[in-house]
Image (cartoon, rainbow, N blue to C red):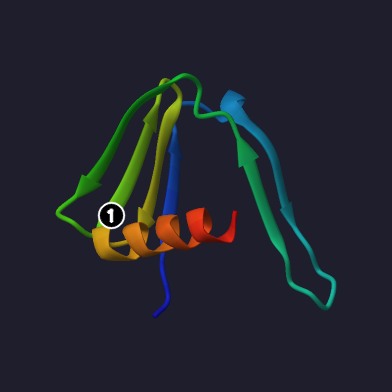
Amino acid sequence: MEHSFSVELTSKKYVRHISVSNESHDRVLFEGFLGELEELALVEGAVLEVKGANGVLRIDLSEDELRKMLSQTKEAK
């Protein structure tokens, strides 16, 4: 299953770096500053939302998938 994401910043001054490569790897890099984290929520059980003072990061990720990934991370340590 593919997962989508979005990043919404309140100002372009919080964008640190954007890079779109024309090389064969077709890599894209987006870096910025969410600022101080204010809230972490699971919207409708399907979207992980991280809210910061400067913007919001949303990831299409269910609660079950999140729990599974977190447990795998703990087991690997």
Q: Residue 16: x and y, percent?
A: 68, 33
Q: Amino acid at mark 1?
A: Val
Report the side of 23 relative to 50 (left or right).
right
Q: Looking at this view, is 33 or 44 the one in front?
A: 44
Where disc 1 sits, the SS reads strand
- Residue indicated by mark 1: 47
Q: Residue placed farthest to the left in the image?
A: 44
Asked which quadrant contains residue 61, the reply is bottom left
| Quadrant in which the N terminus appears | bottom left
| Count of marks overlaid on the render | 1
Farthest right residue? 23
Please state which of residues 4 and 71 is positioned toward the viewer in this rendering: 71
User: At which x and y percent is residue 2?
Assistant: 42, 76
In the displayed structure image, the side of residue 48 where residue 9 appears, left or right: right
For the point 32% across and 43% down, the residue is 49
For the residue pair 71 and 28, the one nearer the viewer reads as 71
Q: Position of residue 46 (x, y in %)?
A: 23, 60
Image coordinates for residue 58, horizontal then vertical, percent = 37, 48
Residue placed at 61% from the left, 35% from the top? 32
Q: Is residue 24 above or below residue 62?
A: below
The vertical placement of 33 against 1, above or below, is above
Judge from the rendering whether residue 16 lies leftward or rightward of residue 45; answer left or right: right
* Nearer to me, 52 or 64: 64
